[in-house]
Image (tube, rainbow, N blue to C red):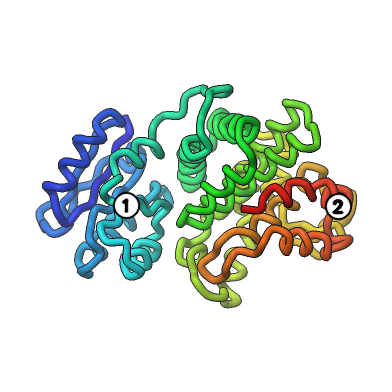
Amino acid sequence: MSAFLLLTDTPARAGRLARDLTDLGPSLVIDLLDPGQAGLLPDPAAVRAVVADVTFRGSAPVAGIRRHLDRFGERRPPLVCLLHEDTPRARSQALALGATHLLPADKAPALLAEAFRPVPDIEGADLAPAEAVARADAVLTRILALGRGGTVEPETVAAGAALIEGALRRADLPAWLDVVRRFDDSTHQHCLLVAGLAAGFGIRIGLRSKDLRRLTEAALLHDIGKSLVPHAILSKPGRLDEAEAAAMRAHPVLGYEMLRGQAYAGEMLAVARSHHEMLDGSGYPDGLWGAEVPDLVRLVTVCDIFAALVERRPYKAPMPADGAYAVLQGMGAKLDRDLVRAFAPVARAAVP
């Protein structure tokens, strides 16, 4: 059974948290200030998440967390940092460690249970947007973790797509986007924004159920290659240097290679590899031109660009939806003009 690895500077407090999480499985508590526990580590394949339960005031606990994370290598699981004091220093320390979730410590048991509970088949269930987002993020967390060191099962992706589609059919798009915009981790925020926009777009233009599912799954997977990009680059608050930009631009090929050979159709692989291609040949990584860019890629690309403009990033404020749509229009022949026109109602609906 998969376990939580609780890294703490206060064992009694972490012990209480471990007891609160028993319904989700076992937890191993390691006291970062006890040299005798420095070598403890469960089977890396059995760790569903590392939970950092420290105050982020001293350097020793932070160094201890980093040492334990380094021992996972490329199979590093999600990192959840609990904020006992929600300060800029604590947040910056957590993000520098590569946190995938920042959670208020006083609400940790409930939020961890929500994020990491098994995802049942709940297509058609009456979920509020916040709960649907939390469950979809649990699926996304699993997808990105698997991407770093294993097979990304189509069933897992399908479960996330079903959650997103169901939420978008029952609630309006702004409600979904409002919840997703609260995420601290930029990769999670972006993937869920793109998937929500894609599902909303597909519903708006009347895609058949099978095609809508394919679009939502592709949108959820499109940036999986970022799971292999160093966290320091993904979370950097300023402009990337030349080497960092090259590493970031490698993520489409990384995602394609990650999924190739698994049970995914060619069009799904094309979205992972080609969502930064432009119809005028100016995109990357292959400089595709016109008809070489498949329809599914064109759909996801419109949603991807719009999401990147309206979301909050460490280095920029979110752009208003009308301004972001104007950017899409201004890209002219780079994008499918018919799809951009059809996206207008979705862009208007994205206004907070």
**Left or right of 14, for residue 253:** right
Which residue type does callout 1 highlight?
Pro
Q: Are marks 2 and 1 in contact (CB under 8 Å)?
A: no
Instruction: Please identify the quarter of the rendering in which residue 327 is found.
Output: bottom right
Q: Which residue is at the front of the view, 79 or 199?
A: 199
Structural crowding at the residue carrying mark 2, measured as other residues with C-alpha within 10 Å and reported as few (<14), some (14–19) or many (≥20): many
Q: Amino acid at mark 2?
A: Asp
Query: Residue 79 location in percent, x, y?
Result: 36, 51
Q: Secondary structure at mark 1?
A: strand
What's the residue at 51%, 67% (across, down)? Answer: 314
Element carrying mark 2 = loop
State which quarter of the image contains the N terminus. top left
Residue displayed at 68% across by 31% down? 213
Residue 194 at least partly seen: yes
| Residue position marked by numbered label 2 in the rendering | 336
Query: Relative to residue 86, is residue 256 drawn left or right?
Result: right
- Viewer-nearest residue: 206 or 241: 206
Disc assigned to residue 104? 1
- Image point (30%, 53%), residue name: 82
What is the number of the mark on residue 170? Answer: none
User: Residue at point 73% right, 45% down?
Assistant: 270
Is residue 146 visible in the rendered image? The answer is no
233 lies left or right of 37: right
Task: Give the image location of residue 329, x and y in percent.
Answer: 83, 60
Q: Nearer the viewer, mark 2 or mark 1?
A: 1
Rendered location of residue 91, percent (x, y): 36, 64
**Image quadrant of residue 332?**
bottom right
